[in-house]
Image (spheres, grey):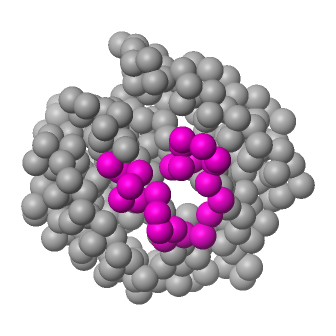
């Protein structure tokens, strides 16, 4: 399929999804909203405001943005002004809200650790969503429980999980420790929902996700259909099973500025 026809097809699917009426809430269901990889332009800032208005009209338990809140330039996500403006914009969301760092906010910037420090100062505190944070350096690693489900959010950025930088190894040790603890807490729960920015199944030049995929595969084998991965990064909406027993939900991303409703039993 040509790029033009593929783009038109994707736009048509997005338009149909955006215009469709929301289904009624199933009795006893946990319903929340997820979005990511936006806004990347001033025009998308306005479109995100319209998305927030639609989100605010829905009865949701909480909302999560999976990261990449601008392009990785000093004028946008690598700069203080843009991050501050996005913080004010997200404050319009009336539901409990959580933001996860994306690669455009730190690992793709010229000074990644300095930018991650700024992100933490802006978004780790105060808590928009009431969560438990991992003790120590990685305040962006959080978990919470809602309606019998355990949720864990991790700092795992695309496109390659920053694998060539020295910070990769200590961060991933913290990721696995926090994920393993969440999995233990979820042993008697309805299931475990893992939320992060990166798509760990994309084609790679440098694959920084092999160990993480192995861990997710093990969790899916032990608890089929009770492990859910939610991510952004590659800007396409998907709901599939890339690993046996593990459901994967990817959210829309620029230029498709929209949100995804997730219903869990």
Is 126 magenta? The answer is yes
Q: How many marks?
A: 0
Q: What residue sits 60% from the left and 43% below the top? A: 136
Residue at the image position 56 percent from the left and 25 percent from the top: 170
Q: Residue furthest right?
A: 188
Residue 23 visible in the snapshot: no
Q: Does the magenta-highlighted stretch encompass residue 174?
A: no
Most foreground residue, 90 or 54: 90
**How far across and down, in percent of the image, does residue 207 sit?**
46, 16
Q: Quadrant of residue 115?
A: top left
Quarter placement of the N terminus:
top left
Residue at the image position 74 percent from the left and 71 percent from the top: 147
Q: Is residue 85 visible?
A: yes
Image point (10%, 63%), residue name: 43
Dividing the picture into quadrants, the one containing residue 52 is bottom left
Magenta-tinted stretch? 118-141
Residue 205 position in % (x across, y down): 36, 13
Position of residue 248 in the picture relative to residue 72 (left or right) = right
Q: Who is closer to the viewer here, 49 or 83?
A: 83
């Amino acid at each position: 399929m040509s790029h033009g026809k593929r783009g038109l097809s994707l736009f048509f699917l997005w338009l149909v999804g955006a215009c469709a009426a929301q289904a009624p809430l199933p009795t006893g269901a946990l319903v929340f909203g997820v979005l990511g990889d936006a806004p990347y332009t001033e025009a998308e800032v306005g479109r995100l405001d319209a998305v927030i208005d639609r989100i605010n009209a829905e009865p949701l338990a909480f909302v999560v943005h999976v990261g990449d809140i601008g392009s990785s330039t000093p004028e946008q996500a690598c700069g203080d002004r843009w991050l501050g403006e996005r913080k004010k914009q997200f404050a319009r969301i009336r539901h409990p809200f959580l933001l996860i760092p994306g690669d455009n906010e730190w690992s793709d910037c010229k000074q990644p650790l300095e930018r991650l420090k700024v992100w933490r100062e802006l978004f780790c505190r105060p808590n928009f969503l009431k969560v438990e944070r991992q003790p120590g350096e990685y305040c962006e690693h959080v978990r919470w429980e809602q309606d019998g489900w355990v949720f864990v959010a991790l700092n795992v950025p695309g496109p390659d999980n920053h694998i060539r930088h020295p910070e990769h190894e200590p961060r991933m040790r913290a990721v696995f420790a926090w994920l393993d603890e969440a999995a233990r807490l979820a042993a008697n729960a309805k299931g475990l929902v893992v939320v992060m920015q990166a798509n760990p199944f994309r084609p790679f030049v440098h694959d920084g996700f092999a160990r993480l995929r192995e861990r997710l595969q093990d969790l899916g084998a032990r608890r089929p259909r009770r492990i859910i991965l939610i991510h952004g990064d590659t800007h396409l909406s998907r709901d599939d099973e890339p690993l046996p027993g593990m459901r994967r939900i990817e959210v829309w991303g620029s230029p498709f500025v929209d949100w995804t409703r997730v219903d869990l039993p």
